[in-house]
Image (cartoon, grey):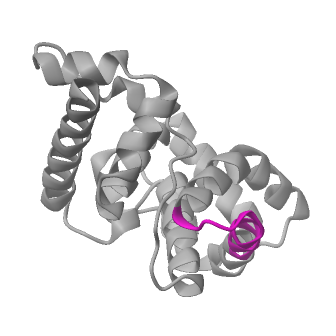
Amino acid sequence: MALVTTLVRRGMSHDERGEAELVLRLARGDAESVTELYSRFGRPLHAYVRSLVRDAGLAEEVVQDTFVAAWRGAARFEGRSSLASWLFGIARRQARDRMRRAVPETEPVDGLIDVAGGGLGPEAAALASASRAELAEALDRIPAADREVLLLAFAYELSGPEMAEVLAIPAGTVKSRLFNARRRLRAQLVEEELR
């Protein structure tokens, strides 16, 4: 089992060791590990999948399929990524397989309020003062790939390397997508404010 070597790797944080041990228990067929995995990641995965597929029932099926795939693939988890990015990647692939064209909705927008950075002028002010409804409308007007990267970064708080893994793109591409997505979102909010 590849994960066994991960458990003895030096320099692992307490959280990383806990995640590795959870996956090891999952690979061994421990039923309680599935419950623990679901309690930790069920809601964020469902919200993420719900942002990718419009049908609530389909989103639930995708999440269930994600946990089944994690159960079956746990023995192959090598610990090169975080448990969260591994699960989000599985969920994304499951959703993509179900819906050849992922069109994210804008349900989990609360975390996106933090997108505004200091000193960015009127665009940042528009973003910071936007209501949830205004933010949702602005997100609907930007490309699906932009919505997805913003949701992963701000609603689900994945790091750049984790987003690169989930999206299967280089880390540099994640940075440029995130920069452009923030710019497009701000522009939509400024445009809405001017109307």
55 within the magenta span:
yes
x then y, percent, for residue 187: 18, 37
x then y, percent, for residue 81: 42, 59
Number of marks in picture? 0
User: Residue at position x 67%, y 50% from top?
Assistant: 41
45 within the magenta span:
no
Q: Would you say residue 1 is visible in this rendering? A: no
Specify start and end residues of the magenta stretch as a single range: 52-65
Eyeballing the image, is 65 above or below 81?
below
Query: Relative to 123, is 45 on the left or the right?
Result: right
Q: Would you say residue 19 is visible in this rendering? A: yes
Quadrant assignment for the N terminus: bottom right
Query: Relative to 100, is 75 on the left or the right?
Result: right
- Frontmost residue, 42 versus 135: 135
Eyeballing the image, is 58 above or below 99?
above
x then y, percent, for residue 90: 55, 72
User: Residue at position x 35%, y 41% from top?
Assistant: 138
x then y, percent, for residue 22: 69, 55
- Frontmost residue, 134 versus 155: 134
Eyeballing the image, is 143 above or below 120?
below
- Frontmost residue, 54 versus 44: 54
Eyeballing the image, is 53 above or below 127?
below
Q: Quadrant of residue 71?
A: bottom right
Query: Relative to 1, is 117 on the left or the right?
Result: left
- Frontmost residue, 193 versus 15: 193
* View extreme (front): residue: 195
Secondary structure mostly seen in magenta is helix
Quadrant assignment for the C terminus: top left
Query: Relative to 94, is 175 on the left or the right?
Result: left
User: Residue at position x 36%, y 24% from top?
Assistant: 114
User: Residue at position x 25%, y 39% from top?
Assistant: 188
